[in-house]
Image (spheres, rainbow, N blue to C red):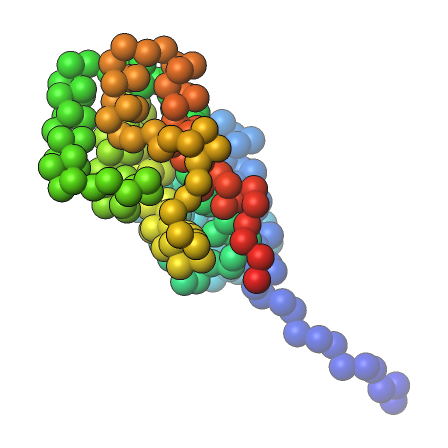
C-alpha cells in the first residue's frame, strides 16, 4: 500500500483572515451603510463554504473593531467605528517600537503646524479669554526657562486643538499625548543644558496667543515653528549615542 507524506494541518487562522477580508468586501459590494442589517452567520458560512465557527470568529474581529454590533430583534448590523477608541487600545509607549514612537511624535508636530488655518477660522473671544487664563497662570509661576514645562505645554496646546473645532483632531491629540509625553521626557534626559534657539529667542505661549489675536495664519505658523524648534531639531538631528 502506497505511503503518503503527512499533510500539514489547515491554518485556521489564515482562513479566518480570508473570511474577514471577504466580509468587508461584501459590505462594500452591496453598498451597505451604517445601521443596515447583514446576513446571519449561517448564510455567510453557506455562501463562503466555511464553518459557522470561522464566520463567527471573523465577525468577532469586526465587532472588536467597532464595525458591527448585535441589535435586539435585528441581528447583526453595521456600525460607525470609533477610530480613536480602537487606536487607544494599543497606544501604550512601552509596547511600541522606537521607530513607531518617532513617527507618532512627528505626527503630533505635523498636526500642530497643520491646524493653524482652522484656529483663525474658528477662534472667538471666549477661546482667547481661556488662553489668557492659561498663560496668566503659567506666568504667575515665574517660569523663565527657555524650555516649556510639559503640563503647561499640554494645557495651552490642548486648548488650541479645542479651538480647531475638529473633534477627530481633538481625539488624536488625546490619543498621542502619552507618546508626546514619553518622547518629551526622553528629550529632557538626553538634553544637555538650555536649548539654543536659532533666532536667539524662545517663542512663549504669550507670544503665540498675541499672534493668534492680531496676526495671520502665516505669522502664527512661523511662530509655532519657532516655539516647537527643540522638538523639530530632535527629530531632524537626533542626539548620537
Quarter of the rendering containing residue 2: bottom right
Q: Is residue 152 left or right of residue 49?
A: left
Quarter containing the C terminus: bottom right
Residue ID at (41%, 35%): 228
Farthest residue to the right: give it: 2
Farthest residue to the bottom: give it: 1
Residue ID at (42%, 14%): 218
Quarter containing the N terminus: bottom right
Quarter of the rendering containing residue 170: top left
State how many labels appear. 0
Q: Where is 75 relative to 219, above or below?
A: below
Residue ID at (43%, 21%): 222
Answer whether residue 67 is visible to the viewer in this image. Answer: no
Quarter of the rendering containing residue 34: top left
Residue ID at (33%, 42%): 147
Answer whether residue 239 is visible to the viewer in this image. Answer: yes
Task: Report the front residue among 222 and 90.
Answer: 222
Q: Is residue 50 left or right of residue 107?
A: right
Q: Where is 28 relative to 1, above or below?
A: above
User: Where does residue 213 sit, x and y in percent of width and height?
Assistant: 25, 14
User: Where does residue 119 sit, x and y in percent of width and height?
Assistant: 31, 19
User: Where does residue 73 sit, x and y in percent of width and height?
Assistant: 25, 42
Q: Is residue 121 left or right of residue 50?
A: left
Amino acid at each position: 500500500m502506497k505511503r503518503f507524506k503527512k499533510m500539514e494541518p489547515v491554518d485556521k487562522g489564515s482562513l479566518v483572515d480570508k473570511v474577514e477580508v471577504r466580509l468587508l468586501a461584501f459590505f462594500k459590494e452591496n453598498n451597505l451603510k451604517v445601521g443596515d442589517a447583514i446576513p446571519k452567520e449561517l448564510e455567510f458560512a453557506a455562501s463562503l463554504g466555511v464553518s459557522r465557527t470561522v464566520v463567527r470568529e471573523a465577525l468577532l474581529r469586526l465587532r472588536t473593531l467597532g464595525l458591527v454590533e448585535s441589535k435586539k430583534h435585528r441581528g447583526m448590523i453595521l456600525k460607525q467605528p470609533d477610530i480613536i477608541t480602537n487606536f487607544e487600545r494599543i497606544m501604550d509607549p512601552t509596547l511600541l517600537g522606537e521607530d513607531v514612537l518617532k513617527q507618532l511624535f512627528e505626527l503630533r508636530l505635523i498636526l500642530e503646524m497643520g491646524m493653524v488655518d482652522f484656529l483663525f477660522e474658528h477662534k472667538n473671544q471666549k477661546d482667547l479669554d481661556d488662553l489668557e487664563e492659561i498663560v496668566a497662570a503659567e506666568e504667575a509661576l515665574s517660569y523663565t526657562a527657555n524650555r516649556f514645562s510639559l503640563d503647561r505645554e499640554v494645557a495651552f496646546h490642548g486648548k488650541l486643538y479645542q479651538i480647531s473645532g475638529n473633534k477627530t483632531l481633538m481625539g488624536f491629540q488625546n490619543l498621542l499625548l502619552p507618546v508626546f509625553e514619553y518622547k518629551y521626557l526622553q528629550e529632557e534626559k538626553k538634553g544637555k543644558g538650555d536649548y539654543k534657539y536659532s533666532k536667539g529667542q524662545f517663542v512663549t505661549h504669550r507670544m503665540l496667543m498675541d499672534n493668534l489675536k492680531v496676526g495671520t495664519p502665516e505669522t502664527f505658523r512661523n511662530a509655532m515653528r519657532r516655539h516647537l524648534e527643540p522638538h523639530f531639531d530632535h527629530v531632524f538631528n537626533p542626539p548620537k549615542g
